[in-house]
Amino acid sequence: MFSIYITSFIVGGLICVIGQLLFDVAKLTPAHTLCILVVTGSVLDGLGLYEPLIDFAGTGATIPITSFGNALTHGALAEAEKHGLIGVLTGMFEVTSSGISAAILFGFIASFIFKPKGSV
Amino acid sequence: MVMKGLLKFPSTPSIVATGVTAGPLEKKSAFQAGFDKMYDDERCNLKTNEQGHSKLMEDACMIALSKVDKIPADADFLVTGDLVNQMTPSSFFATTVGIPYLGMFSACATSVSSLLTAALLTEAGMSKLAIAGSSSHHNSIERQFRYPIEYGAQKGAAAQWTVTAAGAAAVVPFQKGFPSIERGTVGRAIDMGMTDPLNMGAAMAPAAADTLKRHLEGHGASASDYDLIMTGDLATVGFSIFKELVKNQGITEFDNFSDAGMEFYGNNPDFKAGASGAGCSAAVYFSEVYQKMKDKEYKKVLLIATGALLSPLSFQQGETIPCIAHAVELTMK
Amino acid sequence: MDKEKYAKLEQKISPKPPLLKNVIKAFLVGGTICLIAQFIALFYMTFFNFTERTASNPTVATMIFISMLLTGFGVYKKIGQVGGAGGAVPITGFGNAVVSAAIEHKSEGFVLGVGSNIFKLAGSVIVFGVFSAFLVALVKTILVKMGVVSW
């Protein structure tokens, strides 16, 4: 139970390290890096590897953007299991709706409150 | 006589006054003592970044005019530019002052290209008083060329900080006791295949070296003739590369070389390689350099403003970054 | 000087990213963000009716909320500068991309500015996520139907 805090830190940190290597070594922009990580998460779930990672690392696996790809695939697969091919399309946002709705909601609210500041 | 981009001004138009305005962060600038006005609010207490940008330029122009007891109606030409799409900040301020207006875009080299144009108009006898200048505004430029201001992208050591500043110069036919414009060189657009918009200095250095070479050879001058040779906004990385390129041209002494962008914020690591933006060279040339010329500390200076002629679109389409550098030679008699 | 020779000179002089330092900072910042999220998940499991699995949704939403505050107060860009990918890869970085675009484009109004630009940076992640999820799920479903693999 307690070990999840350690594995969360280490796994989450390591996924970020992969991102940093894509920044500095592969010279990719943040947008390209994040897209690659999302696709990776989605493929890992297709191979059935991401869920075990969540069991092992908790938020270390659910907080990095890879989990977004995983959640999309997971939702699609769960629906596909029930309804066949059509489920691939309909199930996509089943699991991951909270992240996107929270981002839209808080982003919109922020635009009422904040102004960008050009400080260092 | 065909001059291949070389300009000579036998009547030596003079710069009788300058005005420099800057934003709140620029209080940290090494040159801040020479700035005429600095705002506490990054939008100059206006609603949008672009309105603030416009205000900066307007105030710089008004300050320059007021120093010679003139009003906008006395001016014959206004030659200014900035980096925002279609240069709306310059154009909006041009509507408020109502001076006949030529918009000028040479990216961050606009400070010198406007000065050269104003000098040409004066030389041709078409202008008794022309205002030349350029400006940039951190928030408006960053959001256009890079990311939203609050986005947490990591900047490398070669990245530069767009300054919030504007500089304007009042150009008149020769007057004794003021720095005057003797010669100039219009740069060639040069593309050495650089693609990294977070390392603009490296993209611009070849343009600066090319213009320096053409200016010296074309006008039969040597680098040691000048008390100061100051490039625009190459910053630390670009300036090091520039020096390497200039060494290949046989110049070995760099005591009189300097770069406005590199020195702008001192050695403050927050600003990475240094400053950039059309306001950077204008603010430095028209404050510190101008003042030192008036005080006769400098008798002859060569200002080479540098600009990267990219747009967010050209970058996203995978194009390389073409660059330009324009040179103007000022003398104090 | 030709372009190739210049590229060599530029490579020689331009500073290299301090790889080891950047990697360590990304690890620490990213790890810390995930660790904080783990405590938030614990909070939801302890005080609300969530299991380890279902706590993930409110945790993600809370992290994005925190990211909104940090972005609005100008702190997240500092986290991003220090942490690099450590700030960008966690869901808080996704939140930062959305929130920073939203507040940046407020000057063009709520519909044309905020509404149209809110996914300016984060949109590509959603597009690629959805498309890859579609492909992966499609392939897997077909493979299952063919009896090659099982769910």
Image: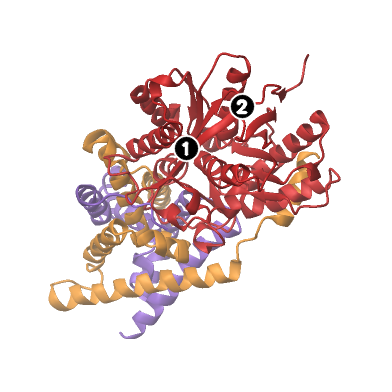
Q: Which residue does the image show at 71% across and 22% down from the upper left?
A: B10
Chain A display color: purple
| Residue holding disc 2 | B116
Residue flagged by tag 2: what amino acid is it?
Leu
Q: Secondary structure at mark 1?
A: strand
Chain B display color: red
* N-terminal-most mark, 1 or 2: 2
In the rendered image, residue A16, in percent from the top left (x then y), is placed at 46, 65
* Observer-nearest of B269 and A20: B269
* Observer-nearest of C38 and B152: B152
Q: Is residue A76 above or below residue B309?
A: below
In the rendered image, residue C94, in percent from the top left (x then y), is placed at 35, 55
Chain at tag 1: B
Which quadrant of the structure image shows residue C92? bottom left
| Residue holding disc 1 | B135
Q: Is residue C145 visible?
A: no
Which quadrant of the structure image shows residue B140? top left
